[in-house]
Amino acid sequence: MMETRSPFLDTIFLLRKTECITLFSNFQEISSKEEAEAGDYFETEFEKERLEFLSGRMPCDRAAAVWAGKILYHSAQLYLIRENTAKNIDRLIFRFKEKKDISSVLSADLSLRFLPQIIVALNTLDPEDVLIGMLEDILTEFHYSGIGYDLDLKGINWEEELKDSTYRKLYLERILEKRDYKLAEIPTINKMLIAELGMHKDAFWRELKIITEEN
């Protein structure tokens, strides 16, 4: 699946394989055939990751995976190409319109996990860029992919958000991986993290404070 196919598919394949982004000189429409091929690819990648988190009941949400791939591709190209894009930016960068659940969150994460790096690059070019806010809104909704990036996540009921054991484990593991102190010091998440790490807490994250509601 790494053959040269199209700017869209090449960008997604190369990014997931090498974490490098290919920038092209002009936008091209993404065909339904390309979307179908991307959907097949994401299903394969999701299955590989699903085996790692050992959840046999978690299907890939193709619609979410392909949507997120398009968001990632378009945002990467908008980093370079802005001529005549202002009037079309809402068509290129748009919110997920289907049902959002754990499957869609994890499926979208196949691409959205790379979005914070693009936002940082955009911010370096122009902190006032309207695209930054649009992408941050997407990450705020799909905040699993934004762990490690400073998002405003006030108002979330974390007990409810992380009630699924598989999602909770993945969420806590990524907080640990990214050393996201802001999330780790939210009392509810902090309690979950401390329980997850147990007696090995200092070995994995010595600097992590134990937070109580009173703190």
Image: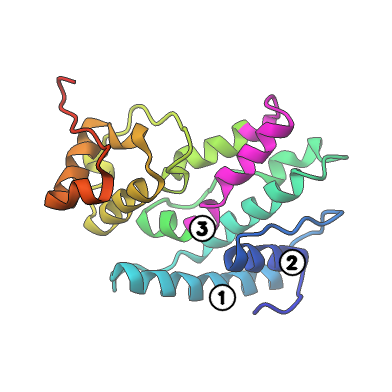
Sort mark 2 into few (<14), some (14-19) or many (20+) by Cα contacts within 10 Å.
few
Of 111 and 195, the residue lying toward us: 195
For residue 172, above or below residue 84: below
Labels 2 and 3: the sequence-earlier one: 2
Labels 3 and 1: the sequence-earlier one: 1
Task: Name the residue furthest left.
Answer: 199
Sort mark 3 into few (<14), some (14-19) or many (20+) by Cα contacts within 10 Å.
many
Distance from disc 2 to disc 1, alpha carbons, whole Å, reads: 14 Å
Which disc is residue 40 wearing? 1
Residue at the spot 65% in from the left edge and 56% down from the top edge: 70
Q: Is residue 112 magenta?
A: yes
Q: Is residue 156 visible?
A: yes
- The type of residue carrying mark 3 is Ala
- Extent of the magenta region: 108-132
Task: Name the residue furthest top.
Answer: 214
- The type of residue carrying mark 1 is Asp
Labels 2 and 1: the sequence-earlier one: 2
Give the percent coordinates (x, y) of residue 90. Answer: 69, 40
Of 206 and 37, the residue lying toward us: 206
Of circles 2 and 1, the one toward us is 1
Disc 2 is placed on an element classified as loop
Disc 3 is placed on an element classified as helix
Give the percent coordinates (x, y) of residue 112. Answer: 53, 52
From the viewer's perspective, tell me whether residue 27 is left or right of residue 108: right
Residue at the spot 28% in from the left edge and 32% down from the top edge: 185
Give the percent coordinates (x, y) of residue 176. Answer: 33, 48
Question: Residue tagged by mark 2?
Answer: 31
Determine whether label 2 and label 3 are within 8 Å by CB: no
Question: Residue tagged by mark 3?
Answer: 64
